[in-house]
Image (cartoon, rainbow, N blue to C red):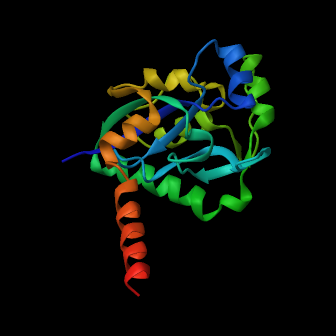
Amino acid sequence: MGKSIYIVLTDTGTLLSKAIGMYTRKDLNHASIAFDEHLTEIYSFGRKQQYNPFIGGFVRENVSDGIFRDADCAIYRCDVSTEAYMRIRRKVRMFELNQKMYKYNFIGLFGVAMNKEIRRKRAFFCSQFVATVMQESENHRLGTTPSLTMPHHLADLPHLEMVYEGELQHYLNITRGPVEAPIRIGLLKSLAFRLLA
């Protein structure tokens, strides 16, 4: 029996995203890969600090907050064999274990703009990372090389099914449910305890 992974394209509204959009003429210019429909385990190459776009690398993303708070998205489900799923997970785990060695491939973005492949050791941009990881599944490879892959190219991966398009936070509310309720209940209990003490 196979497994599902998720390709997530987002419009984060950052300056870098807007700059990439000027070239791609697309709205969704950030790409990530997730291992669950709730997007709790989601990875990419991007900024490591919310307010500093120049320090980037491999990241496990929190799509509930920060630059994703007002993001639009398109989410695609990709069914893969169990063997391919495990290879993809191992590849991502390798990035995670060695994340200090990896940097964001800003120079590679200029190569994409010029349609010239620029390979840098241990440096990736978001869609290059996702395309590289997806090469672990022989049935889900793009015609372009990872270093020339733009986010919208990933929507052309074989056997992809779009499961959602719209506001990212709305999708999270649908799949995860409201997260504020337990917090509010906890606050009420705390206030009641203080009043009764």
Question: What residue is rendered at 35% in x and 28% in y?
Answer: 164
- Is residue 38 shown left or right of residue 145? left
- Is residue 181 shown left or right of residue 102? left
The total of numbered circles placed on residues is 0
Q: Quadrant of residue 70?
A: top right
Q: Quadrant of residue 130?
A: top right
Q: Relative to 27, is 175 above or below?
A: below
Residue 185 drawn at (x, y percent): 34, 65
Residue 115 drawn at (x, y percent): 72, 17
- Is residue 35 shown left or right of residue 126? left
Q: Relative to 53, is 182 above or below?
A: below
The reply to whether residue 129 is in sight is: no
Outermost residue, left side: 1
Question: What residue is rendered at 56% in x and 40% in y?
Answer: 68
Say which of 135 and 19 sits in front. 19
The reply to whether residue 11 is in sight is: yes
Say which of 193 and 123 sits in front. 193
Outermost residue, top side: 25
Residue 135 drawn at (x, y percent): 48, 38
Outermost residue, bottom side: 197
- Is residue 7 shown left or right of residue 129? left
Q: Relative to 74, is 103 above or below?
A: below
Question: What residue is rendered at 54% in x and 32% in y?
Answer: 71
Question: What residue is rendered at 43% in x and 45% in y?
Answer: 34
Image quadrant where one finds the C terminus: bottom left
Residue 106 drawn at (x, y percent): 78, 35
Say which of 171 and 135 sits in front. 171
